[in-house]
Amino acid sequence: MITRIMDVSEEPINIEHIREASEILKNGGLVAFPTETVYGLGGDATDKEASRKIYQAKGRPSDNPLIVHIAKFEQIEQITKDLPETAKKLADAFWPGPLTMVCNKNEVIPYETTGGLDTVAVRMPNNPVALALIQESGCMIAAPSANTSGRPSPTKASHVYEDLSGKIEAILDGGTVDIGLESTIVDLTEDVVTILRPGYINMDMLKEVVGEVRMDPGIVYNDKGTTGGAKPKAPGMRYKHYAPKGDLTIVSGEEEKVISTINELTAEAEKDGKKVGIIATSATAGRYGWGQVLVIGDREEEQSIAHNLYDILRQFDELDVDIIYSESFATPKMGQAIMNRLLKAAGQKTIEV
C-alpha cells in the first residue's frame, strides 16, 4: 500500500483533498488527520472492520478503546444512552476542544470501536481540517493517535509517515498541531465527573462548570503496568505509552540538585560508552556539561513544554541515544498532564534528589 500525503496546511483548506480523504473513510479505509492535540488515525466509527484496521495498523491492543470524533453535539446523542445533562454543560464550555467524554453507548457504535466496553469516548476536535473531514465524509470518526502503539504521539505529518507509511491510505498534512498532548478524558457514567486522563483542560477548569470533580485512581501507572486492578475505561490507562527508544528517566527535586545529578549520571554513562540525551528548559540547558541537550521549552510558558514533548522524544530517536534524562515539569496548569505522559514514557522510572 502506498500512503499518500495530502497538504491541507494552507487557507483555504484544499477541499479536493478533504473529499478524497472522505471517500477513503466511506469505503472503509484509514486516513490520518490533524487535530489541535495530536494527529489522529481515523476510520468510520460505526464500521467494525475499519476499527479492526486501526488496531492492526497501530499494533494496538484490541481492548484499548478508540475515541469517536464528531462535528456537532447532536451526534453524541445519536450514539449514547442515558446521556447526563453534564455532557451539554461541558460541551457548551469546552467543545470544540481537547475534552473527551466517556458515556454509556448504544448499539450504533460497535464493540470493536470501544474495546469491548459498554461505554464510548467522544469528543469534538477544534481543528478546521478535522471538522471538515467529519462533515464531508458524513462519518463519525474513530481515531486514536496516528502512531505505532507505545511510541511518542505524532504532532507532525512526518511523525505519522515514519510510523504508518505503507499501512494506511492517506495522511492529511495540516502542519504542526497546536497543543501537542492528547485530550483530557472525563467519565460521565458515575455520579461524580471523574478524570480518566489529564490534559489541557484541568480539574479547576472542569470544577468551574460542573462543581465536584475527582481523579480516577486508575491514572496511576504501577510497576506492573496495570491500573491497580481497575478496568480501564479510556485510552492509555493500562499500557505503556509515548516511549522513545532510549531508556528514559525523570529526575525531580530542587533545581540545583537535579542539574548536578543529571550531570553526574551523564558523565558516568558517557565514560561507559553510552550516548546520552538530556531534556532541559531554556533556562537550564546551558548548565549541562555533557550529553546531547535538547530544549523542551520555558517553564513560564508551560504550553511550550507540552507542545514540544513528543517531538523532543522523537528527535532523540533520530539521534540514536541510549539513555535520556529529563527534568521534572510540575507547572501550574498543564503540569499534571505533562508529567502523566512523561511518566508513562519512562515506565515510571524516576529519581528523587
Image: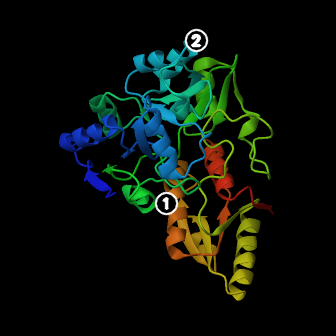
Give the camera-side residue of 264 and 221: 221
Residue at the (74%, 50%) spot, across then down: 225
**Residue 328 in the image: x percent, y percent?**
68, 57
Please tell me which of labels 1 and 2 falls first in the chain: 2
The mark closer to the camera, 1 or 2, is 2
Q: Which residue is mark 2?
A: 82
The amino acid sitting under disc 1 is: Asp
Picture quadrant where residue 292 is located = bottom right
Q: The residue tagged with tag 2: helix, strand or loop?
A: loop
**Residue 114 visible within the image:** yes
The N terminus, quarter of image: bottom left
Give the camera-side residue of 282 and 346: 346
Picture quadrant where residue 44 is located = top left
Q: Which residue is mark 1?
A: 311
The amino acid sitting under disc 2 is: Asp
Label 1: few (<14), some (14–19) or many (≥20) C-alpha neighbours in 10 Å: many
In the image, residue 329 sits, relative to residue 139, either above or below, namely below
Q: The residue tagged with tag 1: helix, strand or loop?
A: helix
